[in-house]
Amino acid sequence: MPTDATFILAGLFVVAAAAGWAFARFGGSREKENTKAPISADYLRGLNLVLDQQTDEALELFIRMAKVDSNTLETHFALGHLFRRRGEVDRAIRVHQNLLARPNLNETQRHQALFSLAEDYLGAGLYDRAEKLFLQLTESPTIATRALENLINIYESESEWMRAIEAHRKLEVLNGEKSSRGGQYYCELAELARVQGNFELARQYLKNSIRGGSGALRGILIRAAIEKDQGDYPEALRLYEQIVEKDRRFTVEVLGPLLECHKKIGSIKELEKYLEQLLKNEPSLQQDIAYAAVIGNFTEPDIIIRCMENFILSNDLFRSFVDVKAMMSEDPKIRHEHTSRIADALRDLSVNSARYLCTNCGYSSQNFIWHCPSCKNWETVRPLRIFQIDVSMS
Ligand SMILES: [Zn+2]
């Protein structure tokens, strides 16, 4: 099937032939006959190649024939764009390199051609080459903003957070407004420093993230983890509770650390009181707690076990698998035995399933991520509170 790009190529041969004919008809009379013949031959050959779908040969012929001037410039860009969109990146690169080889481009046109070539390199996965060209364009009066946006995307995908911060700052200056991404980059650096045990540096990055104006929730989560790592459990508990206060969906995520910290300082009773209050204010959190308990294999305190029992008994499918009488027994030992049996089965079935979901695009993953790889948004992923069960037979 002929493609959009091949139609444009065919059109270009018509334009080139018409230009050649006009030149021959109205231009220099001495070479009239000589000029007419080769253009006509090239035109027919080009059209033939297009019709035979020999796109590479047709493209080479076109590049040799067509003059780059104000009339054909936009067509060159359109052709390159079409090739890139169709995944024919090599051809797009050939078109844009041909444009850049012409000495008669003005600055705006040259920058546009460089930008298009950089986009081709991106499309081909040649990030280093694309980065070099986008960097050249960060001072361009016409295209700096788009060049910086592309650079930021490259740095984000390569986890080059310091470079992302630098490019982001330049973009903020150009746009004359603050954006929330900078805070996320500092959170990335803070988390890396925390994992490496460099708590001082992590705290410094977190201060910058607050100045960056975003990642507040994430910043608290990292601070809580730092306090836990350093053994300040009361402060860690305060911060984890703050996260639940800000976004209840994080209950699933912080229940484990809450339990861990309370165990360390022997204050499980305090956790019971806290969860009781939480459930009183928002009974639906019972499901979140039950979900976290099953996934994390929590066996205490009683309030967590009760949430699991209620969760199992309130689900028709689960009820059909358990001895409901035993689940209602007065003896907690009997109840626990039955609860843990179904909890173990649920955990086994959901071990390879998604646990997190992007609230913006629906991308799901097994691990928590702050930067959605699908829609590229930050802080849109949230923990799931329902089991995604894999029942495929092996
Ligand atoms: Zn997403």
Image (cartoon, helix red, strand yellow):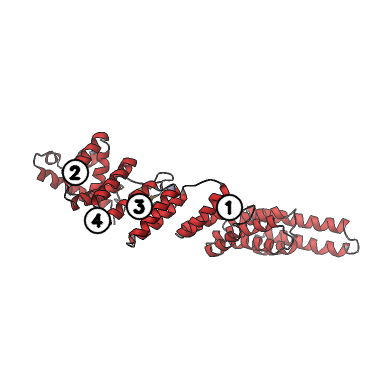
Instruction: Report which residue position mark 3 lands on.
Output: 368
Helix, strand or loop at label 2? It is helix
Give the vertical position of 338 relative to 165 (above or below).
above
Of the two numbered discs 2 and 3 on the same chain, state the one appearing first in sequence.
2
Instruction: Report which residue position mark 1 lands on.
Output: 146
Q: Position of residue 286 (x, y in %)?
A: 24, 39
Marks 3, 1: nearer the viewer:
1
Of the two numbered discs 3 and 4 on the same chain, state the one appearing first in sequence.
4
Instruction: Report which residue position mark 2 lands on.
Output: 270
Q: Position of residue 98 (x, y in %)?
A: 68, 63
* Distance from Cα at disc 2 to Cα at disc 3: 28 Å
* Distance from Cα at disc 4 to Cα at disc 2: 18 Å
Marks 4, 1: nearer the viewer:
4
Q: Residue at x 22, y 52 (%)?
A: 260
On residue 231, the disc is 4
Q: Give amino acid for label 4.
A: Gly
Q: Position of residue 39 (x, y in %)?
A: 79, 62
Mark 1 surroundings: few (<14), some (14-19) or many (≥20) residues within 10 A: some
Helix, strand or loop at label 4? It is loop
Q: Is residue 111 in view from this perspective?
A: yes
Helix, strand or loop at label 3? It is loop
Q: Give amino acid for label 2.
A: Glu
